[in-house]
Image (cartoon, rainbow, N blue to C red):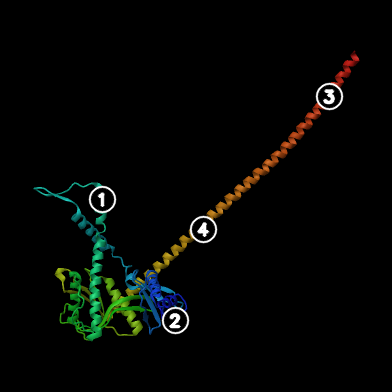
């Protein structure tokens, strides 16, 4: 099926069996279409299928969001495992760390002067100092970006090495392929190899998408393998062999409780829900990346007896996220309702003001008409009075004339 057909079917469009256009002109059209699809459909080109090919998921790489493809081709966002676990507050540790990163960068970048007795701050304008402070505020982001790049490079090397082993050497990684040049990423990958060799790991899956149909969450599991216990009691406190296990790599400086909820909770449940597998262990492995930790690993083994509690913890986070989303939606609806009410109130107030102004104008017009009518009556009355007075005056004048004539 052509790319246009694929695009249309996701939105309920028709499917055509006609071949893709060929030729130089048509090739240009096809390239333009590909550019359009890449720009406006940032989802991964491949689909991820679950439950006997009955459920299709797509993954937005840019936003790291999962979408379930519904019956009409519309996309319904699913909860991502790592996104859900961000609800756990880490500020108690991260804020002091971020402040420390800022302080260290500021001390590294502020200009200094040397004199015979001590190191002094060099003269600096307030504006220049303010710029240094604002730049130092970004220090923690720079460190996180570097750490993310290290983790990505190490994960990519491990994924490729494991996939090669699955395809060619019965899942056993004998050596790493495409080893990163960056020293910290290389150290992480080598630490992972040391763990694999110490535990005779035989890989079954790597970078595997997981999905829980029941709870509507998705994620990416680093891998699933058969694992044996090692001879180091500080690593493996129990003996086990051919243990079906979920494995999750971490390149962080510390191991955090949410890693347990992620691997032994969300990932284990989704695998068991879909396939009914009896997973016996989950391994969360912090890979050493600094010079003093190069090639070393810090393992957390979560046995099956802890899986229910781990999943219970994940569900608490998932339900909290859902509750927060519902409350945010309610708040948004309330705000929208308030805005609509205020808008309606403004419209009504405007209409009332308009009606009041109209009524006032009509009242003034009626009053003017009334005043004019009263004025007419007054004028008419005054005129009548004047005529009557003139008539009386005339009558008095004639009487006086008659009296004067009789005297003569």
Within 10 Å of disc 4 (Cα), the crowding (few <14, some 14-19, many 20+) is: few
- Which quarter of the rendered picture does the N terminus lie within? bottom left
Residue found at the very far left of the displayed protein: 116
Q: Position of residue 213 (x, y in %)?
A: 39, 79
Within 10 Å of disc 3 (Cα), the crowding (few <14, some 14-19, many 20+) is: few
Q: Which mark is residue 130?
A: 1
Q: CA distance from mark 1 to mark 3?
A: 104 Å
Secondary structure of the residue carrying numbered label 2: loop
Nearer to us: label 2 or label 4: 2
Nearer to us: label 2 or label 3: 2
Q: Which mark is residue 394?
A: 3
**Position of residue 151 in the picture relative to residue 1 (left or right):** left
Can you tell which quarter of the image residue 8 is in? bottom left
**Position of residue 325 in the picture relative to residue 349 (left or right):** left
Residue on which disc 4 sits: 341
129 and 334: which is toward the camera: 129
Mark 4 or mark 2, which is nearer the start of the sequence? 2
Mark 3 or mark 2, which is nearer the start of the sequence? 2
Within 10 Å of disc 2 (Cα), the crowding (few <14, some 14-19, many 20+) is: few
């Amino acid at each position: 099926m052509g790319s246009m057909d694929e695009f249309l079917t996701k939105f309920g469009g028709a499917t055509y069996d006609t071949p893709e256009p060929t030729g130089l002109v048509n090739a240009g059209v096809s390239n333009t279409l590909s550019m359009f699809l890449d720009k406006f459909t940032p989802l991964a080109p491949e689909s991820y299928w679950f439950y006997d090919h009955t459920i299709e998921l797509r993954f937005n790489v840019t936003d790291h969001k999962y979408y379930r493809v519904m019956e009409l081709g519309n996309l319904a966002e699913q909860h991502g495992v790592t996104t859900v676990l961000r609800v756990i507050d880490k500020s108690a540790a991260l804020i002091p760390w971020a402040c420390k990163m800022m302080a260290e960068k500021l001390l590294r970048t502020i200009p200094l002067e040397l004199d015979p007795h001590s190191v002094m701050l060099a003269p600096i304008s307030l504006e220049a100092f303010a710029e240094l402070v604002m730049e130092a505020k970004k220090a923690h982001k720079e460190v996180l970006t570097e750490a993310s790049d290290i983790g990505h490079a190490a994960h990519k090397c491990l994924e490729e090495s494991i996939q090669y082993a699955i395809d060619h050497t019965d899942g056993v990684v004998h050596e790493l392929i495409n080893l990163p040049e960056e020293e910290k990423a290389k150290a992480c990958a080598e630490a992972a190899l040391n763990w694999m060799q110490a535990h005779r790991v035989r890989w079954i899956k790597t970078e595997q998408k997981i999905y829980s149909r029941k709870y509507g969450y998705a994620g990416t599991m680093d891998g699933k393998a058969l694992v044996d216990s090692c001879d180091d009691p500080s690593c493996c406190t129990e003996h086990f062999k051919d243990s079906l296990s979920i494995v999750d790599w971490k390149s962080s400086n510390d191991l955090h409780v949410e890693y347990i909820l992620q691997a032994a909770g969300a990932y284990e449940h989704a695998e068991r829900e879909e396939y009914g597998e009896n997973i016996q262990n989950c391994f969360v492995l912090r890979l050493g990346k600094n010079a003093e930790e190069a090639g070393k690993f810090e393992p957390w083994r979560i046995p099956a007896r802890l899986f229910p509690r781990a999943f219970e913890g994940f569900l608490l986070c998932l339900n909290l996220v859902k509750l927060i989303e519902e409350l945010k939606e309610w708040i948004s609806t309330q705000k929208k309702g308030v805005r609509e009410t205020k808008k309606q109130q403004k419209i009504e107030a405007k209409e009332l003001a308009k009606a009041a102004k109209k009524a006032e104008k009509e009242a003034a017009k009626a009053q003017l008409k009334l005043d004019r009518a009263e004025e007419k009556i007054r004028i008419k009355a005054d005129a009548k009075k004047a005529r009557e007075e003139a008539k009386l005056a005339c009558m008095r004048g004639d009487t006086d004339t008659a009296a004067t004539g009789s005297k003569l």
